[in-house]
Image (spheres, grey):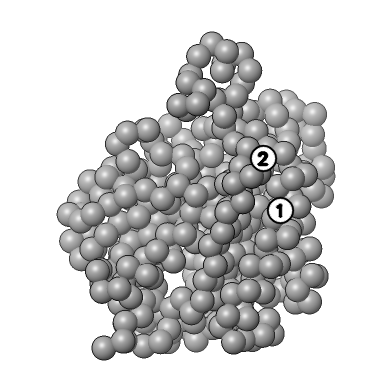
Amino acid sequence: MARYSHIIGWGRYVPDRIMTNDDFAAYLDTSDEWIRQRTGIEQRHLRTENDTNASMSVAAAEKALDVAGLTPQDIDCIMVCTNSPDYLLPAQGSLVQHGLGASCPAFQVAVGCAGWAYGAVLADSLIKSGLYDTMLVIGSEVPSYGLDYDDRNTCILFGDAAAATVFQVTDRPIGIQTSELGSDGEKAMSLAISGGGVAKPFSQEVLDNRSHYGHMNGQEVFKFATRVMQSALKNVVEQADLSLDDIDLFIPHQANLRIIELAARQLGQPLEKFYVNVQKYGNTSAASVPLAMVEAIEDGTLKPGDTVAAVAFGAGLSWGAMVMQMGDETGW
């Protein structure tokens, strides 16, 4: 039979701790108004002492499996998309596999904010190839671990979260229709944690230079994001032989409301067609797109039968986009 993949389970987890813009304004030279005007963010969730990347991944995955009506033993392969693993070794996938009680291959995908998009395309390809029938793709990030909370230009942007999706084989031509993955490594250091790795091992100099924290060339990343969001969405929609007007819902990476608003204007689409939850969570990196997708399903914005276009972009500088055809109520 012809093999396709579709999403049959979804779940999310956000930590209980909330940090508002006013919390930053209490000790930084910033304000709620300044942050809202420039980013659209009102608050973000940050991990508590009980949260790890693995525990957040497992919590989201358990909800996704419950929705799918599956057990951990039904999973053929696990992908954890993250750039904030609990350890350099072992790989994050192994920790999540153990935490779930699964017995299958598991690995980590590290492509920054585009991680889940890469993972979804890879899962779709592996299922279509016949290698696996059921795959768990998790976007889980704890960017708060690498933030300099004295840098008002970066620390206000990010939040911690996890979201999980279960992909399963189907003979119906639904799921991912077209996709585009890309990378512009020439500008890789525009968004980076340069200290603490092999090139610049952890040292007193790294501490003194604060290079173990994330640093971003905001202007460079903003220009890249606005260009790539527009071009990638256009490309995958055209490849699907559709027009932008045929898309029922756009699910963009939730990095900055201004980027989403600009993309909507450039694409000639109403902002109402773009799902936005950046105000509640900030930029949750690889968890951003699946978190928005799960929330859109839960609140009824994303409906069975809808045609969806999703796009993510970030460190690398990398990006991923896709057009997905949702199925009916018996199996998305």
Q: Quadrant of residue 51?
A: top left
Callout 2 amino acid: Ser
Q: Quadrant of residue 265?
A: bottom right
Quarter of the image where the C terminus is located: bottom left
Quarter of the image where the N terminus is located: bottom left
Q: Position of residue 159 (x, y in %)?
A: 57, 44
Secondary element type, mark 2: helix
Specify whether residue 240 is in view.
yes
Residue positioned 43% across, 64% down in the render: 120
Q: Position of residue 210 (x, y in %)?
A: 61, 21
Tell me: 106 left or right of 283: left
Mark found first going from the N terminus, 2 or 1: 2
Secondary element type, mark 1: helix
In the picture of the structure, the residue carrying the numbered disc 1 is 224
In the picture of the structure, the residue carrying the numbered disc 2 is 190
Establish if 10 lies above or below 255: below
Residue positioned 64% across, 28% down in the render: 149
**Crowd around label 2: few <14 · some 14–19 · many ≥20 (10 Å):** some
Establish if 119 lies above or below 15: below
Q: Nearer the viewer, residue 37 or 261?
A: 261
Is there CB contact under 8 Å for labels 2 and 1?
yes
Q: Position of residue 286 (x, y in %)?
A: 51, 52
Numbered marks: total: 2
Residue positioned 33% across, 75% down in the render: 128
Residue positioned 78% across, 77% down in the render: 268
Residue extending farthest to the front is: 186
